[in-house]
Amino acid sequence: MEEIKKFIPTEKITLFRSCLVSAEYPGVEASTKYVFDKLGVEYVIDRNQSCCTGLGHYYDIFDELSTTALAARNFSYAIKNNHKQYVPMCATCYAILKTSAKNLNEKEDVREKINKAFRENGLEEFQYTKGDIDPTNDITHVVDVLYYLKDKIPEHKQRDISGLNIATHHGCHYCKVHYDDTLCGYRNPEVIDKICEVMDSPALKWYDQKPRHCGGGFRQRYANRDLSLDATVDKFLSLHREKIDVLLVMCPNCQVQFDRYQYVLEEKTGDKHYYAVLNIAQLVALYMGADSYKVLGIQTHTVNLEPLLDKLAIEYNPKGDTLHVTEE
Amino acid sequence: MSQKNRIGVFLCHCGGNISDYVNLEEIEEKLSENEEICSIKHHENLCSLEGRNIIKDQILRENLDRVVISACSKITHGATFEKYIKPLNPYLYEMPNVREQCSWVTNDTGKATKKALSLINSAIESVKYNEPLKKIPTTVKDSVLVIGAGISGITTANSLAKQGMKVTLIEKRPAVGGAMIQVGKVFTPDKMSEDCAACLLNPVIDEMVHNENITLLTNTVLERSTRNSGNFDVILRKKPEYVNPEKCTSCGNCTHACPTFAPDEWNEGLNSRKAIYKPFPQAVPSTYTLDDEACIKCGACINVCPTNAIHLDAIDEIISLTVGSVVIATGHQRFDTSKRPEYGHSFYEDVVSQMQLARLMGVNGPTDGHLQVPSTGKVPRRVVMIQCVGSRDQMPDAHKYCSKVCCMVALKNANLIHSHYPDTEVIICYTDIRTPGVYEKYYKYVQDNGIQLIRGRPGEITREDDHMLVRIEDTITHTKQEIPTDLVVLSAALESSEGTIDAAKTLGVPLTEDKFVKEKHPKMQPVSTDIEGIFVCGTAQGPKDITDSIIQANTAATKISELVNGGLEVEPFIATINVKKCVLCGTCIDNCRYQALTMNKHSVRVGPIACTGCGDCIITCPEEAISIQGQSDEKLEASIAGLLKDKPDDEQIIIAFLDDIGNVSANNMGINRVACPSSIRIINVPFINRVKYRHIKYALTHGADGVFLGEYPDTPKHNDIRENVKVMKKHLEEDGINPERLLIHSVFIPYFRGLANQFKEFDEELQVLSK
Amino acid sequence: MTKLNRREMAEKTEKDLAHKVLDDIKAPKDLGLLRCVQCGLCTSVCPASRHSEYDAREIIKRVLDNDETIIEDEVIWNCFYCYTCHSVCPVGNSVCHVNQILREMAIQKDVGKKQIESFMSFADSYLEEGLGVIPQEYQGQLKIDYGKHWENLQENLQEVREDLGLDSMYLLPEAKETVDKTLEAIGFKKRVQEIKDVRNRK
């Protein structure tokens, strides 16, 4: 195991909820909880927590001050609950929270402006004191925790998932924004790959464009659809060349781009090749024996997972999926 | 001082430079009240021959045992007066600097006179503690250990050996020659051509092999080194000699018989070699060698060896030596390109390093000098070179520095390709081409030959069908490009080698932030290290080309020759240890950054060449057993007492302890006639940490209004000194003294106006404080 | 006749664009903007540069040239905020951050507000629920791209979450209240209104 230069928690965790996980792939949250429970990780989910603003922030709607103020508000709850180890499931939440903590710690004028706004509006309880949250050691991604506990994962093995051709796609906002805090490299990111290795299902060592982004690009997906998809095509074709079975992600935004748009991309490029798009927590849950519908939530995926389960000879009850309907 | 001294005071007018501003009559009158002063004389110019006669005459006539010469700075005329006080011992005088630090910086005669008197009184009190000392003659053993047998190490060894010194040259690898023997071709400026590196190097190697003063040990590393009064006791470890060099006839039967392969380092891993092998055909020594990590000990080689030269159960040899000097010539290695996965060196066989390219083109390389694309075996249609891989990059895993030689290496290899394969296109992608001096001509010559240069730093390389693709923006034409190519060559940064870092650690020599061996002074002493007797040359000290390495190697040899042949005499101001107080705890030894102290059976010994008299050991010694010869605590205290003697209540006095840099800066203040508050009284100390809390407390409780510490910050002790000042301020508070009365500030030689301002501000602050 | 740009020696009365960027709240403390040597590494790793007129290096060039017209230039809206340039820049610069700052400068003017007003339903939802959602304006295209399955998911989300054993995704009522108060206090609501006003002016 390579040297880990940041603190990785296994208790006193606030599992920070993500808007995209909640509304698009809730199975990622269920899988994370499932895996954490198996591994004995102690965490809470707090319905006082607001969304990190990330999408809005990168649509340029939220200004830095507003995002930071909301982070200060969230931090105060976690501290009060004695669960100040933030563990988000989304790469954007991870980076936004770290940036906010840095702003609050390092920029006195920002901290003072926010505290003043709190004081003058009866929100004294949210005031932030320098150093309340350590951006490196108090904010870690779910994959950091899984990596830290990876040697315990095989103890919970229920299913054989070996023999898959897996490509990993690491979220840019996990790898590249605060790259000093990234585990296992960011120019050739390998943190998910290392988790795959312990499950006897190693990922491709390298493929063309491996460290590149998904193409979502926040506003681009919506306001600049063609540009966004053109960018996705680069990686999409590279994945097709590698004939992968699974694209493994760690961020719901990337999952949307490769899963929700898979058929659009096939049409755009005329290049067809089936692959499933899974979050690493979903794959670990699958390995640990979790139910495909009730935990992984594969019914929420645009691309059916059933062909993959067939390949692995994993049984499922197709009635678990009421969302996919055969279109007339 | 129980018995009374017989002190003589001489007051120099300096042709009016002093006497126009300082009332010397008044001073003479005041001094004559002191009964220890047996003689007071003035003169227009004491530094003149007439001055000499006056001084000498008074010493003999009045039987003086100490002398104070009130004149200019010691830097100007210290050496002069040292001679003039003969027959007295040259260390029995003091020179209050009444010119630069008084008459030239004080406009008011009354104030200048008061200040001059206080400076002279300080010297009078201080000189009482001077002891007769002698310069220390030293000898250095004429044997040298040179670590690393590349071009730098061999050059140094040859030079030293020719000057009659005994050299042990050790090399970690099985053959000598380092990087130069591997590169194949080197560039020769005057001919605009690429010459055979081995042909240039071989005579140098031959010379080394045939010089009887040189013992070459390959497969050998430095394991331990201890300083022993000026010498170094070193322990070397030589890998087991599986193949007996006396018996081996280099027939090669063993290699044919060996079933095991390992990557061939000589060819940068482009092909494989056997576990028992000769590194390359022209290797020196020519004996076969065995890679015990790859060897499976099957014994096949033993069976075929006609001279019975192979012993698989051979063991390491430990060699112990005592040498007078050590040269670190451990060279460089190249940046690990797997840290830039986007360039695909680990994933694509058609991406190679410049050194691999050199091997591909070397006549003794894996393809016998034929340039081939590794994946196809064909001559490349196009080669793209990428510069600055791992250099000029501030990412934590890379190097901020420019590695200096890569532009020339790329141009050289590009031109070589062009001259052998005119149909092959060569493109160099660069950020800046750095070819200073005559190299610029070669750069233009290569451009004229049709080598293309694209200004831009490529972002990634991928594989497409049967070729590679380089993505780059041509930043001159502002075009985003994808360049298909058969071969990609990475110009990886030169970086400090593992061997360099290991050697530095073993020898206790500090490294720079870039992990190269740190020179004593990067500009003025480029081959010396902080440890007297240890020298550095070649790329162990930083990226450089062959010519610069050779220059530095010869310089190192010269410096060692100075030590050995110079009949060195060093100043006696070094640490001395009171054996009655010393408990042999060793704390001073651990704390001495110059490795000047060694444990010697029942005492701690001070190496006179290594010791700089910095005084760090004084502070660390728990028994207060250490002092600096001729610079006792008592002497320093007496200087302070002298400055404060007869101080009237309404006069403000600031005692300014300045290190040597600060003292020169204060002299510059005088030379440039920059006014300085008359309250400032300077005491020059060799290093700021020489001033103890007792001195500061003494000053502040005996009449000084403030204490100023002037420290040159660019030393390894800077942080310690600043911390120590914080501690002292706390002590002052505990002792009921306002800590604001102590101030530390950085000093620099050209920054004398700044220093004058600091003095002025502190003077004003203290005036406010005292109200 | 060609007009040459003169670099006048007169004392600068106003801060140039590069320093405005460096002083912005969004600029990381050690942003290497002034260390840029225009090596073009950013452009050659940048997806927006690859697929559009955008050129990462050129953005920095124009900022360093004090070319304020860049704030009004459409091209800044092409950055994906993928931070690839930020993670490889040899001098510690970050085109991604500089772009965010330029867009914010544009938003201070109408030209930037127009670029983002179509995303304002995100702000509305956030003010109401403390949660982010996909902007209303783009739902139509998404329904086409994602298909019927996705519509089914949106309609049955509550049920799907229950099947997965998940709690409600919405914030507690009192939490929503303090989110709202926070956004009022920090001036976000004012910002939202100003952006919407541009829409109404159209």
Image: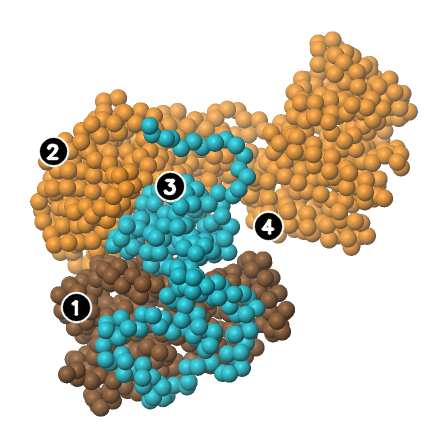
Chain colours: A brown, B orange, C cyan
Q: Amino acid at mark 3?
A: Val
Name the chain under label 4: B
Which secondary structure, mark 2? loop
Question: Are there few (<14), some (14-19), or many (20+) residues within 10 Å of tag 1?
Answer: some
Mark 3 to mark 1: distance in Å? 41 Å
Image point (68%, 29%), residue name: B666
- Same chain check for tags 3 and 2: no
The chain letter under disc 1 is A
Tell me, yes or no, if residue C185 can be seen here. Answer: yes
Question: Mark 4: which amino acid?
Answer: Gly
- Image location of residue B139, percent across then percent down: 52, 30
Inter-mark Cα distance, 1 to 4: 75 Å
From this viewpoint, is residue B58 visible?
A: no
Name the residue tied to disc 1: A266
Do callouts 3 and 1 mark residues in contact (Cβ within 8 Å)? no
- Badge 2 or badge 4: first in the primary sequence: 2
Q: Given the image, what chain letter belongs to the residue carrying mark 3? A: C
User: Is A31 placed above or below B346 here?
Assistant: below
User: Gap between marks 2 and 4, in whole Å?
Assistant: 68 Å
Mark 3 secondary-structure assignment? loop
Q: Give the left or right position of residue B739, taking residue B481 as reference.
A: right
Q: Nearer the viewer, residue B637 or B116?
A: B116
The residue depicted at 70 percent of the width and 23 percent of the height is B673
Q: Is residue B482 left or right of residue B506?
A: left
Residue type at mark 2 is Pro
CB contact under 8 Å: marks 1 and 2: no
Residue under label 2, please give it: B422
x then y, percent, for residue B617:
63, 44
Quarter in which the N terminus of chain A is drawn:
bottom left
User: Whole-Å distance between the Cαs marked 3 and 2?
Assistant: 33 Å
Badge 3 is on which residue?
A: C37
